[in-house]
Image (cartoon, rainbow, N blue to C red):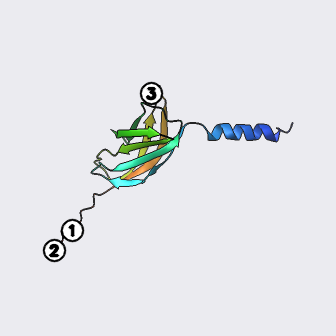
Amino acid sequence: MRAVPLLLLLALAGACSSAPGVERCVPQVGSVGGGEDVTVEGRGFAQGAIVHLGHKQARVGSLRDGKIEIKTPPCSEVGPVDVVVTQADGRTLVLRQGFRYQESRVLPMPAK
């Protein structure tokens, strides 16, 4: 078997790391009530992208520099959901269980 030149391996590794994809959400947790600001971070996002958290479409605010600013949709269940970015050309980028819904926090009313 012939050795693969190191330069070729480095080139392939670089090509793989620049492939489009969803890396993370910041923050990764939000309320089932929705309406929270979340940044979806990744690579290769195109204008016109649509974002779903689970089966619910999020409202996209802006897309720039590998970041999509969204408002979370409400969700009827607590737990993790997939983050799906659908590009304008129909390709989908998925981060499995990339966001987690939790119970809405209710703050106590201050004493009068």
Q: CA distance from mark 2 to mark 1?
A: 9 Å
What residue type is disc 3 on?
Ala
Mark 2 element type = loop
**Is residue 36 found left or right of 46 in the rendered image?**
left
Q: CA distance from mark 1 to mark 3?
A: 44 Å
Question: CB under 8 Å between callouts 2 and 1?
Answer: no
Mark 1 element type = loop
Camera-near label (2 vs 1) is 2
Q: CA distance from mark 3 to mark 2?
A: 51 Å
**Is residue 36 found left or right of 90 in the rendered image?**
left
Residue holding disc 2? 111
Q: Residues within 10 Å of mark 3 (few under 14, many from 20)?
A: few
Q: Quadrant of residue 17?
A: top right
Q: Quadrant of the N terminus?
A: top right
| Front position in the image: 93 or 1 | 93
Mark 3 element type = loop
Residue 108 is marked as 1
- Is tag 1's residue or tag 3's residue first in the polypeptide sequence? 3
Q: Residue at x 47, y 39 (%)?
A: 64
Residue 88 is marked as 3
| Front position in the image: 110 or 98 | 110
